[in-house]
Amino acid sequence: MKFTLPALLAPDRQADRVVPPSGFTAQLTLFTAGAMAFLAVFALALSLASGRLADRWASALAGTATIRISAPPEQLDTQVAAVLALLSTTPGIASARALDTEEQRALLEPWFGPDLPVDALPLPRLIELTEAAPGYDSQGLRLRLSAEAPGAVLDDHTRWRRPMAQAAERLRLLGALSLILIAGSTAAMITLAANAALSANLPVIRVLRLVGAKDAYIVRAFVRRFTLRALTGAAIGTVIAMIGIALLPQADEAGAFLTGLGFQGFGWLLPLLLPPLTAIVAFAATRTAAFRTLKGLT
């Protein structure tokens, strides 16, 4: 008897009598599949959201740079003008502009509040520049800045982009590793449940074999019951997790670092793959455990 999908899903009352329809093994299989699917959905959501967040930050920093000018108040405007003139003649720079007081206050407001007396503080002046293709020579620009404006420091955001790109890759790797561990744990728990059901039904299995039942027939009964249990539990866990993610509060601008948590667009279809994948894992685990147990009886 082949283990085809129609044969697996087709009802067979005689074969189903081999496996108890309820009890400890049924509850364990349903709970394990549901819990693991629930965790898998959140692991997938957090992995995708973290990767998107790191990519978004890296993309926002790419192609831009900042020049910070620290100088005595009487020299500050002169050095700003000198830096702007230098940048206007530098190949690879599309535009450059000095941030005004209001823009600097807006940058500091999330950390120090709206009442920060920017005018009374000896803050450095910031110049924002945009890179043009194919880019500029950052080392050469630093040398020119040190000659024209000793208080100017170029920050090309490399130290910010590289850690975030590495973090995105590691978070994706951790997400994939988490899903693999969840799949392995699911297979282990379903195997334990199947072994328990097989052990509890050994007398029935021996009688079936005495009356001529093939091992494939007996295995099919266990595989079908445990696969459907795992599919049901995983579907329930997936739906609950997706509802929980959909109900998460939206972050405002003040909490922009929290935005993107969850799925976006077609990403909502990814969790729907978890129930059938869980059923496949349950199918393989139960089939292996059943054949191993029956082989030990010969």
Image (cartoon, helix red, strand yellow):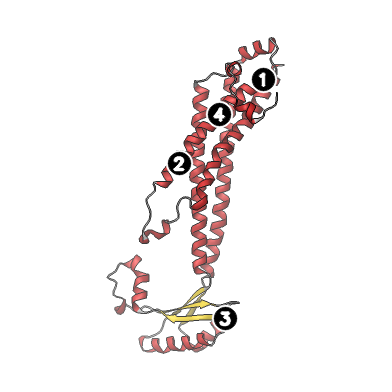
N-terminal label among 1 and 4:
1
* Res. 143 mark: none
**Residue under circle 4?**
228
Q: Amino acid at mark 1?
A: Tyr
N-terminal label among 1 and 2:
1
* Res. 241 mark: 2
Q: Amino acid at mark 4?
A: Leu
Above or below 94: residue 106 = above
Mark 1 surroundings: few (<14), some (14-19) or many (≥20) residues within 10 A: some
- The foreground one among 75 and 194 is 194
**Residue under circle 3?**
92
Q: CA distance from mark 1 to mark 4?
A: 17 Å
Please report the residue visible at 57 percent of the width from the left and 36 percent of the height from the top: 278
* Res. 217 mark: 1
Find residue 89 and report its horizontal and vertical position in percent: 53, 88
Q: CA distance from mark 2 to mark 3?
A: 48 Å
N-terminal label among 2 and 4:
4
Please report the residue visible at 70 percent of the width from the left and 17 percent of the height from the top: 214
Front tag of 2 and 4: 4
Please report the residue visible at 48 percent of the width from the left and 45 percent of the height from the top: 42
